[in-house]
Amino acid sequence: RFERLWFGASLVLIVAFIGTIIYGAVGPGIAMVDDSGGTVEPSVIADGNYEQTDNFREPGVYDTEDGVDVYVVARQYLFQPGTSEPIRVPAGEEISFHVTSPDVTHGFNLAGTNVNTMVIPGQVAEFSVTFEETGEHGIVCHEYCGSGHHTMEGKVVVV
Ligand code: CUA
């Protein structure tokens, strides 16, 4: 009798489908793929208090010996910096982004690049990008985060 065999086969398929869906929903959203194709795990902020990190207390662009670090706080409904003032970074250098949220889950999508990550409260989404050319890239929040979600956007200016 083949019934048992078919039942087993469809069970395997169903499990595989569910696994794919869960991976699709959770996996890539959390593990950020950067320009070099590598993945970066988000780091977790102890107690979820992002302000214990100096750089998040004063978010912005930090020039260090190792390169350029950009700290961004995504909150309802703005990117800080990014929205009221653009994030200014140099072309041709590796820019390390660190993005966190104090309220709800936001998205961080950088137009013209493959940067597309979730910003989860209590975690820091980290990824690096090298902008080869000067110009502007819009930042869009692509995770529904409340009534002002559609207005949540910003800008990166590469100089
Ligand atoms: Cu923030 Cu949508």
Image (cartoon, rainbow, N blue to C red):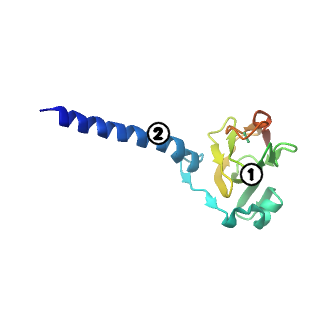
Q: Residues within 10 Å of mark 2 (few under 14, many from 20)?
A: few
Question: Is the distance from the Cβ of mark 1 to the nearest ligand 1 atom less than 8 Å?
Answer: no
Element type at mark 2: helix
Determine the residue positioned at 51% across, 47% down.
27
Determine the residue positioned at 66% across, 51% down.
120
**Where residue 68 sits in the image (x, y, percent)?**
74, 57
Q: Write down the residue under mark 1.
A: 103
**Please, what is the three-letter code of the amino acid marked with disc 2?**
Ile
Q: Nearer the viewer, residue 37 or 145?
A: 145
- Distance between mark 2 and mark 1 Cα atoms: 26 Å
**Please, what is the three-letter code of the amino acid marked with disc 1?**
Asp
- Seen in the picture, residue 96 relative to 135 is either above or below; the reply is below
Q: Residues within 10 Å of mark 1 (few under 14, many from 20)?
A: some
Q: Write down the residue under mark 2.
A: 21
Labelled pair 2, 1 in contact (Cβ < 8 Å): no
Hey, which quadrant is residue 135 in on the image?
top right
Whether residue 33 is visible to the viewer of this picture, yes or no, is no
- Seen in the picture, residue 37 relative to 137 is either above or below; the reply is below
Element type at mark 1: loop
Q: Nearer the viewer, residue 155 or 56?
A: 56
- Seen in the picture, residue 75 relative to 144 is either above or below; the reply is below
